[in-house]
Image (cartoon, grey):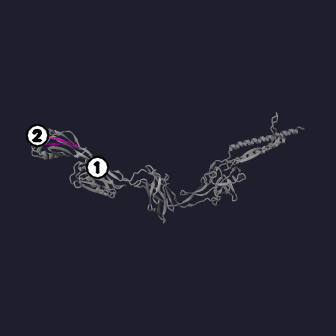
Amino acid sequence: MVSTALFTGLSGLRSHQRFMDVIGNNLANVNTPGFWGSRVTFADLLSFTSSPGQGPSGTRGGKNPTQIGLGVQIGSIDANTNQGTFLNTGRSLDVALQGQGFFALSDGRQSLYTRVGSFGVDEQRRLVDLRTGMRVLSETGGEINVPLSGTLPAQQTSNVSFEGTLPAKVTGPLSEIVATTSPLFEGVAASKTTTNTFTDPMNLSALNGNEFTISVNGGSPQTVTIDATKLGVASLASVTFADFTNGVMSQVNGITLGVNAGQFTFSTEAVGEKASIKFDNKSGSPLTFFGLDTILTSGTQSAATGTTALNSLTINSKDYSNGESIRISGTDPAGSKVAGTFVYGTDGTTVQDFINFINLLYRSGGTKGATASLATDGTLQLEADEQGEARLSIFISDDATKPNTTWNSFKTTRDGTGPDEVTTSIDVYDSLGRSHPVTMILTRDTSDPKVWNLKAELDTADGTLVDGEVRGIRFNDDGSFNIVTDANSNLEFTFSGLAASQTVALEFGQPSTFEGLNMLGDTSTAAATDQDGFPAGSLLNVAFSGDGTLQGYYSNGKTLDIDRLRIVMFPNAAGLQRLGDTLFAESPNSNDPILTSAGNAGSGAVVAGVLENSNVDIAEEFVRLIEAQRGYQANARVITTVDEVLAELINIVR
């Protein structure tokens, strides 16, 4: 039995030595990219059975077997297949796998596998593993050639896509309107009529030297003196109605004096609410003689109409006489000068006569004409006959030598606009890779607010437009895109220096969807957002994408796929055989490889610019190292103890 314990301790020493070997290897490769650590598990050896044991019988219970173990052995050394952390290297050709799988390498005779993607290029520009020089396999199993330089040919534009919102609210087209800054009013003069009745001629001898004042339109009082000289008569005993009328009007400005049935009526020449008249005695009591009070009397006014006489307008300060003129000048909607003279009496005397003259002058109803009218509030306005932008203006004034009326000035009360428009621009590339800015104007159809038309514009220096219009871009009632009714929804260009024309298809979206163009709200975000052309470009760099595709990045902003990495999966990755250089080969227990690409068949994604670190946990390995050391010491103590027992046994015979 003593010798059994000796060999049992020996098996423990051997097993723990192997345990420390594995730990040492793990710690040695703690900084090895892509290294998988290993784990040791122990198993006991066959046990010596001194008593097989027996079952219970009668009144006696059963007995367990009596066995003595013969030692320990290494049960397994398992690979830790957990993924390691990533180390950022900044190299575009360094890659790692986020998840399961292996990169495939070839030495020309067989395929080997690794988790380490430290790739580079050899002198033949083939992608190789920098550690071993083995060639990296593509998805199809071939070599991956990495270009050093190259040119990506230009591609002419064949499609232009639109996105965004056209306004559903209709705001045009509108005709331009200019109007007076304030309305025209028809006014009634302020007037005062004597309450006493007189016969013609009158005897005014009793009033000789009497004076009274008349205040007109709020002005300073004007004095009327009753004497023969002032009235222009030989004697006050016989003053005719005409003599009295002329005499008073010669002393007072701004009034008219009429007589009817023996009563005199004093009226202001001005009319309207600003006209007023007031009488006061200055010496004597002439107002009592005539039957006039001292109460202020004002005129009245209302909105002018077509039948209103020009002399009844409140802006009139002095009545027009036949032959007096009113000047009209300005510009028609096209910007051409307009000028004419309205002759009072000859051309008419009413507001409507004046409006008719303006319409004749501005060619109302004709091409690029304008029509004058009077609004219900008395505003005189002139409206362009056609919708769209206009340069319409008008100015009215009296003859400078005989000003009767202070005409209101005109201002633009509504700018003329064309139909609703939305403008967008995009560069179109020709077959040589030259860019040509193309402006596209979307205009709402004047007959149907749900239909828009497109017109393209190209600088003549860039070429000519063979076909620059697409009509009938229709939208549904809910604002979604419907259809293009134009049989041809393409634009056709002939660019300078090229003989052949180039056709560009316009894509507005899928019918009955809100992808692409739609028509909603009252603001616009519509734009030509994408086109498929590009200029020529030179290769700037290469790098891997997430699916393992090696891509070339060009100076024109384009990316071109060069090739794709092969990713290999195994049903039992832990069963692979290690060959050194962190390479693996198939083994009977790994099963056959599954050839795939990144992201397929459960394989991980490729991460560029990093390498996978070793998955060895130093802290865990140190704990295991302590375990191995203690186990080794314990087994060594068993051997020394057995040695001492054997020595005592030998000493018994002395």
Answer left or right for 346 relative to 85.
left
Vertical relation: 273 (above or below) 368: above
Q: Residue at x 77, y 41 (%)?
A: 633
Q: Which SS class for mark 1?
A: loop
The quadrant of the image that shows the C terminus is top right
Answer left or right for 109 relative to 221.
right
Vertical relation: 620 (above or below) 417: above
Judge the density around disc 2: few (<14), some (14-19), many (≥20) Cα neighbours within 10 Å.
Answer: few
Q: What stretch of residues is rendered in magenta?
A: 207-226
Q: Residue furthest top?
A: 59
Q: Nearer the viewer, residue 309 or 133?
A: 309
Name the amino acid type tagged 1.
Asn
Q: Is residue 225 magenta?
A: yes
Q: Which residue is mark 2?
A: 206
Residue 445: percent from the left, percent from the top?
41, 55
Residue 578: percent from the left, percent from the top?
71, 52
Q: Nearer the viewer, residue 181 or 442?
A: 442
Name the amino acid type tagged 2.
Ala
Callout 1 touching callout 2 (CB < 8 Å): no
Q: Which residue is mark 1?
A: 408
The image quarter containing residue 131 is bottom right
Answer left or right for 25 relative to 190.
right
